[in-house]
Image (cartoon, rainbow, N blue to C red):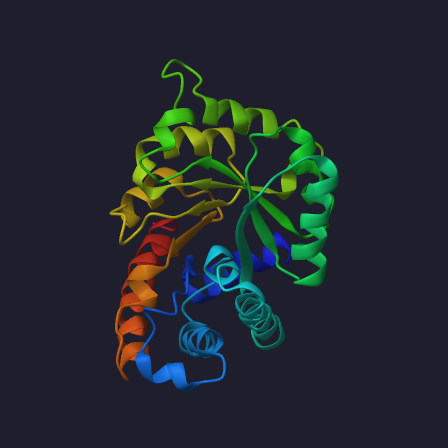
Amino acid sequence: MEKNKLVKEIYRKKSFLCLGLDTDISKIPSFLLSESDPVFTFNKQLIDSLNEIIVAIKINTAFYEEHGSKGWLSLEKTIKYINSKYPELFTIADAKRGDIGNTSDRYAKAFFETLSFDSITVSPYMGSDSVKPFLKYKNKFTILLGLTSNLGSKDFQLYPKQENPLFKEVILKSLKWNESNNLMYVIGATKADYLKEIRSIVPDSFLLIPGIGAQGGSLKDTFVNGASNEVGLLVNSSRAIIYAGNNNDYLKKSFKVAKSYQFEMENLINSLDD
């Protein structure tokens, strides 16, 4: 997907909400378990219900890989369904790949060619040759792990605590790579204090923001500190939306939570024009 199409969808829907499909079969409504593929059915119904208030979908591959070939088939069916019925939705493979060049090249082919995702999360900590195979694809985006929302992020990403902690060095170094315009960055909502500085380093890049909702990040603080002139944010919510209900009304409850995020986002986007 071209970046300008994503920006257009953000302004059309007045939303920068990303739906995280961290689908755990033990948590989906029990009446779906009689389906031939309960995970895909759950995903499909959520996508059909929420497509007009979200702009992106992030599929966490771990929740599918744990079930082996059956889980991978659910993933394949889900991404194929999105691409065929809702091609305007920006798709993210939350796979956190990153390995030596030859291996990364195969990962890139798997997710960009075979599965046709628009983007993939990548760990940068093996250096440039582990990332560059992903960057060569036109209109595909590599989302580098920058400053994540988990408690353990301080172990390495914030070390040392002087002028340039490691996460900042990673971002600065990545801007020197060829095709760095195809980069996005994961920045946790629980790290909102760092967002303003990060935005000054990458003024035009999209930031994928996990940590809203269950992890306690503030949507308003994220926007105030991290929005670009084109919004430039994809705020992900997974558990708070997809597990809002577990009975026959689960879609209604999920929509209510997602709509509350989108309503706040609409007000924030409109504030850019004030």
Q: Nearer the viewer, residue 19 or 21?
A: 21
Residue 74 visible at all: yes
Is residue 220 toward the left or the right of residue 157 in the image?
A: left
Above-or-below relation of 208 to 161: below
Q: Residue at x 40, y 20 (%)?
A: 159
Q: Nearer the viewer, residue 166 or 219?
A: 166
Labels in figure, total: 0
- Dividing the image into 4 quarters, which one contains the N terminus? bottom right
- The quadrant where residue 74 appears: bottom right
Height in image: 171 above or below 264?
above
Q: Position of residue 188 (x, y in %)?
A: 37, 41
* Residue 194 position in % (x across, y down): 36, 30
Q: Nearer the viewer, residue 6 or 182?
A: 182
Residue 136's place in the image compared with 109, above or below, is above
- Determine which quarter of the picture holds residue 28: bottom left
Residue drawn where x is 45% and y is 34% of the image: 199
Q: Position of residue 153 (x, y in %)?
A: 37, 32
Instruction: Give the quadrant of residue 134.
Output: top right
Residue 122 locus on image (x, y percent): 56, 42
